[in-house]
Image (cartoon, grey):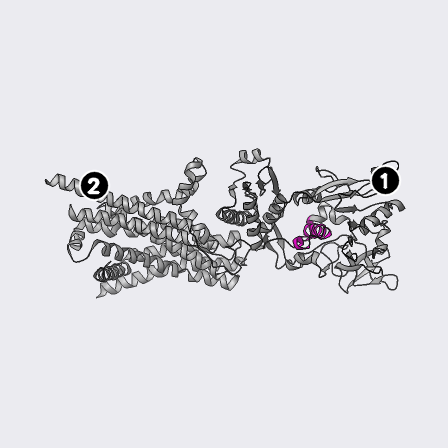
Amino acid sequence: MRPSTWRAAWAVYKNELRLLAVSWLGAVFLSAFWGLGGLFFLVGIGTTGEASLRPAVGNLAITLLFLVPMVTMRQLADEARSGTLELALTAPVSSPALLVGKWAAVVSLVGVGIAGSAPWLAVLWRFGEPDLGLAVAHLLGLWLVGGLCAAAGLFASSLTTESMVAGVLAVVLLLPTWLASAGRTVAPAVAQPWLDRIAVLERLRTLAIGGIDSGDLVWFACATIGWLFLAWRVLESRRWS
Amino acid sequence: MSGAARRLASGINGLIVAVGGVVALGLVTAIADQRRVRLDLTADRAATLSTELRTQLERIRADGRPLHLVAFSSQARDAEAAVRDRFARDLVRQLEQSGAAQTQFVDFDADRRTAESLGVDRYGTWVITLGDDRVDLAERDLFRHAGTRETRALQFLGESAVSGALSRLLTPRAPVLYALTGHGERRLDPRGGGDLPGLAAEVAQHGWEVRPLDLVRGSGAVGAPTVPDDADVVLSLGAQVALTPSEDAALLGFLARGGALAVFVDPGRPTPSCLARFGVMVGDGVVQDTRQIYPFDDRPWLDVAAHPLTAAITRDALAVVLASAAPVRPVEVPGVRYSPLLRTGRTGWVERGQERPATFDPPSDAAGPVDVAAAVQGGGPTGGRLVVVGDADVLTDAVLADGPGNPAFVMDALRWLIDADASAAPVGRVGRLRQIALTGAQLATLRLVLAVGWPLVPLGVAAALHLWRRSR
């Protein structure tokens, strides 16, 4: 992207972040994230007795699959319906800048949600003997999932003018990547390596034990870029239609 | 070009670009998967296989035969099942990622067919096959509880157990253990049953071949009693009557040739006289200590002495429990090295009276510390090895399971006897559960704070912001 595109993306990002900050949407997202996360955390340490964020993070990752599309579903669909998207696309804001700005704002919101897990970490340190590196890996995994869901949500939102449809569509688009691990057990042997390739849970396993695998990081990056790329193509086709 | 044709061309162009972009990203991920770089963030390097296990996996690759591992889940009713399965899944995943093994984690309850096809009837079993050879690991090989009552914690021995299993699969000959018979010993039957089924299963799972040894009848009508040439270890499991002089001579000759003997003896029972000639003897009386394993009054609290055989037990703080043990003490014999393994503290003594409860009555009772298990090593390169334990009950299922360190102590003793000092300590690391301890009241408070109070903060801030904006 050219410097002007970055500047435009920064402007979109700030605007989106401001909107999320002053709207109830951001607050409800954070409230749900922290509430469910707190519940998962306490149930996890209660049942396993383990000083780890792992049970909470595992469940929160699945929660993000539903929560993030609730945030992204309005971002393009609502603007397309109200006609402001056409205005934005005719202004000196390129489609990639628009998408990157909006995506970064949602990822920042997820980041604030993850930062809000600090009280859980404080509990672990006060009453247990946790592994800081393991916790960092878990939270990094959660953030990567948030970024992926945000990108898929934006793509879904670019396809329709109905925000609810966009939300449901995003979940439908993301579900196969979540169910691929379960499908592996019933799939024929020839399909199993391919299911492994698209399975989010498989990509999180190394992070779950405290490791960072470059292959998994690249997969998350490519999957996220892939959804944003498809959203860009949709916006471009809309620009020229 | 008409509008419709232009839109069609534009659409096809867009589709080609989109498909091309997705394919390009797919290729990037495929290449990245081939050239992985890993970083371990954990303090105890839990996300990296131990050097020992990686070495074994390299040997497996060099061997060329396919390695398969099927891990079955723990019993779901078990409170620790989730943690056990989590440990198991993590290691299975790491082994799969190593590229040296094909792995499968099977829910024992959901997939009984796989269990039946492999002949597995217990939760938590791991089946490891290399070509046509197979080793099964029981759940007790993979997990144990270590530490004192206050610090008791679950430990995962998966890396160690898998390393051991791979080592056995790669080793052409299993060590042979001869169990003495004919003197009222406890029967060690490798096919199950017998008097010591738990020990039989343990030695079988560690790759030992068990055979009975009757020194008198086995030597035939003409020859003098002799220990078979293929014997790695001879085991005496609580003999009730004394060995004949010729049997004693056979054992002494075996030790002199560099053989290995393990003697487990109950208080008041005869011991092979060859022991004294090899630098150790079992004394009269029963060992007592004011520090006891509650609620038993015949199980003294034992300290583990420093020795290669006890290195793993010491490292993992495993308690070894003996019931009604006889004292073991050194005999001055030139050229042999006596090393205590288990002993009481200064509060222990040898009780020679009959009073109950037992009390220390000098001078008839001998003051502690008292040894209850010892290792003796002969001099020179062919020096034999001997382990003497003043309790044969330790081998029974009841006592074997009572002491967290008992199975490890017995198996490490056998390994030390065959000069496998390096493997006396478990190969690989011990995965430990980082625990968190919360009282009910603390949990209730945290539930209120973390699941109710903290999530209300963003809503409160949003409400305040909303009111502030309305007021303006």
Q: Which corner quadrant of the image does residue B334 belong to?
A: bottom right
Closer to us: B242 or B258: B258
Residue under the image location 19 percent in, 46 percent down: A237
Q: Is disc 2 placed on a helix, strand or loop?
A: helix
Left or right: B341, with B441 as reference point: right
The amino acid type of the residue labelled 1 equals Val
Q: Quadrant of residue B448?
A: bottom left
Q: Is residue B214 above or below residue B25?
A: above
Residue B356 seen from this side = no
What residue range appears in magenta?
Answer: B401-427
Q: Quadrant of residue A99?
A: bottom left
Which mark is drawn over residue B266? Answer: none
Residue at point 28% right, 63% down?
B465
Label 2, on which residue?
B12
* Image spot of residue B284 (x, y percent): 86, 55
Is residue A234 part of the magenta span, yes or no?
no
Which amino acid type is shown beneath numbered disc 2? Answer: Ile
Q: Position of residue B468 (x, y in %)?
A: 25, 65
Tag 2 subunit: B
Give B387 or A208, whichever is nearer the viewer.
Answer: B387
Q: Are marks 2 and 1 on the same chain?
A: yes
Quarter of the image where the N terminus of chain B is located: top left
* Within-10-Å neighbours for mark 1: few <14, some 14–19, many 20+: some
**Crowd rating for badge 2 (residues with CA inside 10 Å; few <14, some 14–19, many 20+):** few
Q: Which residue is mark 1?
A: B216
Q: Earlier in the sequence, mark 2 or mark 1?
A: 2
Report how far apart the C-alphas of labels 2 and 1 lie in the structure.
92 Å
